[in-house]
Image (spheres, rainbow, N blue to C red):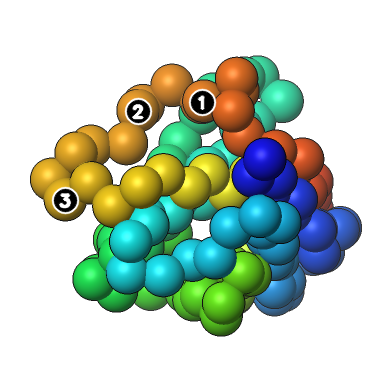
Amino acid sequence: EVQLVASGGGSVQAGGSLRISCTASGFVFDRFSDMAWYRQTSGNECEVVSTVGGDGRKVYADSVKGRFTASLEKNTAFLQMNSLKPEDSADYHCVARPRSPGLAWPGDCPVDYWGQGTLVTVSS
C-alpha cells in the first residue's frame, strides 16, 4: 500500500521561506511515476501547485512560478517555497500516479487518495 505523508509546514511571515517534503512508503518517485503538489485553502479552494513528470519535466502554477521549486529524491519529494505570500497559506499535499504523459491532473483536490498534508500559514 502506498502512503504519502507531507511534513515541514509551519507559520512564517510574508517574504519568508519553507521547505516542505512528502515521504512515500511503498513507492519510489522515478521515471515510471508522476507526482504533483496540491494545496487546499481554508475555503476549500484547490490548486495544483507543481507537477513533476517521470521525465523530470516540472510545471508550476503561475501563482508560484519563480518562487517555488520542486525536487525529488528516491522516495521523498520536496517543495522549496521562497518569497512566501499570505495567499500561499494552505494545506499542502502530494499525490503520485503511474507515469501518464499528457494526462492532466484533476483540478479538484483528490482527497480520496492523497495522504497526510502539511499546513503552511503565512502572515502579513
Identify the residue at image location x=43%, y=21%: 108
Work out how far the residue at label 2 is from the one at label 3, CA to CA, in angstroms: 14 Å
Q: The N terminus lies in which quarter of the figure? A: top right
Work out how far the residue at label 1 is from the one at label 2, CA to CA, in angstroms: 7 Å
Coordinates of residue 6 in the picture (x, y in percent): 74, 53
Q: The C terminus lies in which quarter of the figure? A: bottom right
Relative to 121, say whether 40 is above or below.
Answer: above
Q: Which of marks 1 and 3 is in front?
A: 3
Q: What element carries label 2?
A: loop
Q: Name the residue under label 1.
A: 109
Identify the residue at image location x=64%, y=44%: 2
Relative to 5, say whether 111 is above or below.
Answer: above
Label 3: few (<14), some (14–19) or many (≥20) C-alpha neighbours in 10 Å:
few
Q: Nearer the viewer, residue 106 or 89?
A: 106
Q: Mark 3 points at which residue?
A: 101
Work out how far the residue at label 1 is from the one at label 3, CA to CA, in angstroms: 20 Å
Coordinates of residue 8 in the picture (x, y in percent): 81, 64
Residue type, numbered disc 1: Cys
Choose top left, top right, bottom left or bottom right for residue 15.
bottom right
Q: Is mark 1 on a helix, strand or loop?
A: loop
Residue type, numbered disc 2: Pro
Residue type, numbered disc 3: Pro
Q: Name the residue under label 2.
A: 106
